[in-house]
Amino acid sequence: MTLLEIEGLSMTAGTGSAARRLLDEVSFAISPGTITGVAGASGSGKTMTGLSVMGLVPDGTHITGSIRFDDRELVGLGNREYNGLRGAKLAMIFQDPAASLHPMLSIGRQMTDHLRFHTGISRSQARSRAAEALERTRVPDPVGALKKYPHQFSGGQLQRIAVASAIVCEPRILIADEPTTALDVTVQAGVLRLLRELCDDLDLGVLLVTHDFGVLSSIADDIVVMQNGVVVERGPREATITAPQHAYTRSLIESLPGSEVLR
């Protein structure tokens, strides 16, 4: 079953002779309970693809093509309709969790405000669900954490809180944009295991955006490789890593320590 299908997605910035093609006929699909990794260097279009799904494209850009979520077309969807999906059915976490959390609001306030907006539940019910989400993402002392502020947590704990905030409304799609880049290696591994567990337990469709092919080799089910706004290769993880068909994919894999690519 396909949960999210991107078909012929193109994005242009600017107009006339100054127009730049940021995405060019991007196509792939995400199924429930799977992690689809999108890899590529900076400027490859991988983050723009994730932002397009969320309806958060930069001003001055124009999108064509199709993004279908649960049989609903998202391209051209009005802002009010998108607001009903963002946070509720479509969620996103970013590279720097500190930048996505308000420094002057408690964790509890930030997690419960959008939960109550989307569900209409009471404040006490929202706090209970927020604490459950924090416990699921293994944040120490979940109830106590709700009373604290972002500066009172480490980077790894903040990323877990960001994940908890993203899943508290029980979305169907989770987009993770470079979620481990700012973390040290041991903390990275814990966050990646958490994403894998949430994907399996909650039947989430996860879009994992990263420049690090090593990250995808550990948890992705399918891999999409992008270069200059174009999908140059896509396929199951094992086939893509062991027998890449495109020279760019091969170069990304060969840059990994100890990598072996079939020739």
Image (cartoon, rainbow, N blue to C red):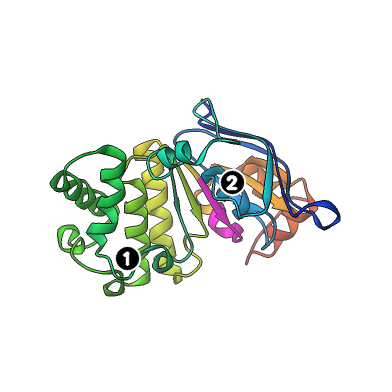
Residue 107 point in image, percent of width and height: 26, 61
- Which of 229/81 is in front? 81
Q: Residue at x 83, y 52 (%)?
A: 16
Q: Relative to residue 218, is residue 41 drawn left or right?
A: right
The type of residue carrying mark 2 is Ser
Which mark, residue 260?
none
At horizontal 78% and vertical 52% (from top left) the residue drawn is: 15
Identify the magenta region: 207-216
Q: Which mark is residue 157?
A: 1
Q: In which image quadrant can residue 58 be found? A: bottom right
Viewer-proximal residue, 115 or 143? 115
Count the numbered circles shown.
Answer: 2
Q: Mark 2 falls on what kind of element? A: helix
At label 2, counting other C-alpha atoms closer than 10 Å, the crowd grade (few under 14, some 14-19, many 20 or more) is some
Quick check: marks 2 and 1 in contact, CB under 8 Å?
no
Regarding residue 204, the answer to whether it shows in the image is no
Residue type pointed to by label 1 = Gln
Which residue position is annotated with label 2? 52
Q: Position of residue 231 (x, y in %)?
A: 72, 45
Q: Is residue 146 visible?
A: yes
Q: Nearer the viewer, residue 79 or 152?
A: 79
At label 1, counting other C-alpha atoms closer than 10 Å, the crowd grade (few under 14, some 14-19, many 20 or more) is some
Q: Quadrant of residue 144?
A: bottom left
